[in-house]
Each structure stands twice: as structure tokens, then as C-alpha cells.
Amino acid sequence: MKYLIILGLASLFFAGHPAVVQGQEVTASEVVDRETLKAFVEGAKDSLESASNFAEVSRLVEVFRSEGDWRAGSIYLVILTPEGLVQFHGADVTFEDKNVLDLEDARGVKVVQEMLAAATGGGGFVEYYWDDPSLEEDTDSPKLTYAVPVTIRGLEFVLTAGFYMDLSGVDAEPNIFEILEVTARDVKDRETLKAFVEGLRVLIPIIEEKGYPYLATVQGAIRTEGEDFKYDSIYIFVISTDGVVIFHGADPSLDGQNLIDLEDVNGLKIVQEIIATATKGGGFVEYYWDNPAVDGDEDTQSPKLTYAIPFNIFGQDFVVGAGIYLDSDTAVNDAGLVDVQVVGDGDVSGLTVEVSRSIAGRVPNYAWHNTTDEMGRAVVRVTADGQRSVNGMYQARVRSTDGATIARWFSIPLMPGSRVTYEIDLNGDVRFINPFAASLDQNHPNPFNPATTIRYSLGEAVNVRLAIYNVLGQEVRLLVQQFQSAGNYTVVWDGRDAAGLQVSTGMYVYRLQAGTDVVTRKMLLTK
């Protein structure tokens, strides 16, 4: 089966333009006539045919989408299948997955069919008429596109830049496969996450039967919000075995990026773990990442669980997976936090804060680390290592950007849900702020309706007062007022005030006063 990548030029008139030397060095901004258009297309053909695998093709396509050598003004790339389906549109991703086989220009010419025929015949120019919105009174001026065949990894395509006809009125191809027993909207826990990802295996024979260009339809369906393949924070990703993002269901800008060294807040190399787990047959990987639905987790991040499997298609190995954010409250209870504040007259940003278990007679393995922000603050989340719980004594150090140790301290007591705070100056002096400080977690869920859970922990026995306030500072509801022992506590607020009436939609503040410690956080009630 043959497939076509069309490279066309918009706003290129047959009037005289100064000639530009042909060759692979011609960029989009240098295309001014037939010769430079053809040279530009041939250069793109060479680039595509030199790709040694689909990962390289993916990276190249992302370059095509960016402003620069391959895209300037109305000159950009468009990829079509032989059936006229837009597989890639360099200027407008919303035009992808639309069948434009019967699209007509201002004079009734079926331009796409003409381009496909020219490419199939070995390559050639196609003249068409269309209004360029950037030019005045150009309706009667002919435009020119050039289509040329190209072979990519054994499959035949063709490539055109600047085919700018308006496709907004063309309907996208319908989602023709509803094949998943467990969809993205069904994913709630480990079991449903695994079933969702394992169900993707049925796509392999479908795609291989229909051919590589069918991936355009598949990718469009996978990226559609609220459908079987993407729902809220549940989406699919595809990466190569060397860490290149082939497809990201939530953020197309990540396509083509190599994330092999991506780390979470604890120093876990996430992508490496996912690849290693998937290539063994599939499995779960737990790590921490910023959850956009949770306010205040930028430093500590939120627990996330990914399930990934190996995926061989067209003879190449990939990794396919999806992830789910876990209950952030559970994560806080299962982890200990080391909060560090670096102070001084010098640059306090970019310092490395490392925490490890104290193991007598051994070189410490600093398994958990983070870097300080511009204010010199870093929070390191210490989690269980699979053999022991968080409970125990730890040691830590702060290193400068050149690797020199600024400060080191020992015998840090941690337990699940606890938080210890240290202040360090640039001379290496360390001050233990408060080992018994109370901590207040972000409510979950947030936003919420009609109820939400608030968790907090106490490092010592103290008098506790937990109350809800509106944005005017008026107390709405008193949830806790009593003496409590050290430990972890959970309170549910049902969204009602002291009189039992449902409060209105909006932002609220919850304030924990535990002895001399006062901690506040915000929450959002929606309806």
C-alpha cells in the first residue's frame, strides 16, 4: 500500500521572483518560486528518508510543527493518506483527522486529488485558487503546491508546505472503534488502570492491517477529551525504548522529546523505571509528580501510579502506558517530609538537598533529594523503600552547585506523616526549627462538592483548633476544638456552616492552630 505526504506552497504566484540556488539548504522562508519550492520539498524528503526509526520520524515531525526552517508564515507541512485523510497539519492541529479528498478550491477543482495524483506520478506541481487571508484581492491569483513521493521506513508517503485551504468546515473522521472493555473514564484504581492499558493491545492488529497512516485516526481519538482513551487526568503515552516520547495523549508539545533522565522529587528516574518494567512484560511504577488538580504540591508533589506494557508495531518496540494520581492524603501519611530553608547573602537557589538513612559503617545512599528554589527552600519527601517503613533515623546534607558539601546533619527522626524543618546558612551552620511542628495537608478532593477530607498531623500533644473561614475572614464552621495527642487525624467537612446550611460556591480557608503552630490552606467548593 502507498501513502502520501504532500508538501505544498501557499501564496506562491507565477509572477517573476528572484531565483534562489536549489539544494537541501533551502528553508521555508527562502521559498519564493517554483525552483525553491521544489528544492525545499526535496530537502524535506531527504530528511524523512534519512530517519532510521519511528522515534526519529516523530522528532522530525515535531520540528516541522515549529516556526523555523520548516515553517514560516503560510509555508508549512501537511501529511495526507491516499484516502485524503489529514494525518499531520503543521499550522493547525485541529485540522488533523479530517478527510479532505473531495475538497474543492474557488474554481471547483478537487485540489487534494490533483496533489495525490501528481505525487503518485513521481512528483509535480499543482495549481489551485484560494483566498489567502493575509493578502488583499488575491482570489484570482493562482497558488502552487508541489507533491513528491518519499519512502519512510519502508512505507511510501509524499510531503507539501503551505497548503492553507480552510478545513474548519470539514468534519473529522468518527471514532470507528469502541474496543475497550475498560475505558479511561472507568479508571479508578490499580485494577482498572491495568485493564485499561492491557486493553490497548487490541489496537496492534488493527493498525498494522490498515497501515501506518491510520495512526492519525487513532491518535486523534486518543487525544479527544471525554472519550474512551482520555478522561480528565487519565491519558495514554507511547515512548521508545530509549526514552523518546513518540506520543503524549495530553501534551503534544512533548512528542519527540527525550525524557530518559526525567526524575521525580525523590530522584527516581521515572522513564527509565517505566521502560525497565514494561520490557519485562508490563507492570506498575510508583513515583511523585505535580498534580494540576492539587494546590500546593509543587514542592512535595503528589503520588502517581503508572502501568506500562511493551508494544511492538511495524516491527519496532515501544512502551505504552497510562497513569493515575493516587490519594494525596494517603501519600502524606505514608511519607515523612524534611523541610530545609537555606539563608544567607549569596545565591541560595539550585542547591541540592539530599536525605538518606543513617547506616553505620556504610557509605550513605542519598536516595531522596530536591533542589532549593529562589528563596532557598526545598522539601524532600522520604518514602518507604519496600523493605522498611519510613520510621527511623536519617541523615542529610546540602551541596552547592559545584558539588561541595555546605552542611551535614545526623539523627533526623522521621515517621509517616511527620515533618521536620531545618534552617541552614551558607556558612554551614544548621538550626533545627521544630521537630514537633504540626502539619496540615491539602484537602482532598479539591475542588470538591459536596464534601471534602482534611488531614493533619501533630508532633506532640497540644490543644487543637481547626476552623473554616470565608474569604472575608469570617468563621464559617468550627470542626475541631479539643486537646489531642501526637498522631495523624482526619476530619470531613460537608460544605455546611455552623447552622447546618449549605454554603455557597467559592474559595474558603481552613486554619489549623495546634499549640503555637498555625497553618492555613485554601480550598474551592464548586457546584
Image (cartoon, rainbow, N blue to C red):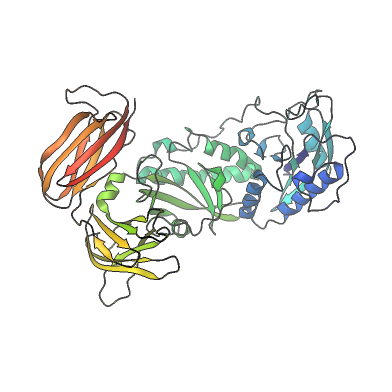
Q: Is residue 446 visible?
A: yes
How many numbered tags mark residues here? Answer: 0
Of residues 45 and 518, the one drawn nearer to the viewer in this rendering: 518
User: Residue 218, image x and y in percent?
Assistant: 57, 39
Please tell me in which quadrant of the rendered image residue 169 appears.
top right
The residue nearer to you, when weighing 190 against 523, is 523
Query: At 15% across and 37% down in the image, what residue appears?
Result: 480
In the rendered image, residue 69, in percent from the top left (x then y), is placed at: 71, 48
522 versus 268 height, above or below: above
Location of residue 139 in the rendering, given as x and y in whole percent from the top left corner: 80, 24
Residue ranking furthest to the front: 345
Q: Residue at x 12, y 37 (%)?
A: 481
On screen, residue 398 versus residue 213, left or right, reads: left
- Does residue 385 appear in the picture of this structure? no
Q: Is residue 263 left or right of residue 517?
A: right
Q: Is residue 205 left or right of residue 409?
A: right
- In this view, the residue farthest toward the bottom is 361
- Left or right of 160 on screen, residue 197: left
Quarter of the picture containing the C terminus is top left
Q: Nearer the viewer, residue 101 or 287?
A: 287
Q: Nearer the viewer, residue 465 or 36?
A: 465
Q: Residue furthest right?
A: 16
Image quarter in which the N terminus is found:
top right
Q: Residue at x 75, y 45 (%)?
A: 28
Position of 135 relative to 183 (above/below): above
Residue at the image position 67 percent from the left and 40 percent from the top: 90
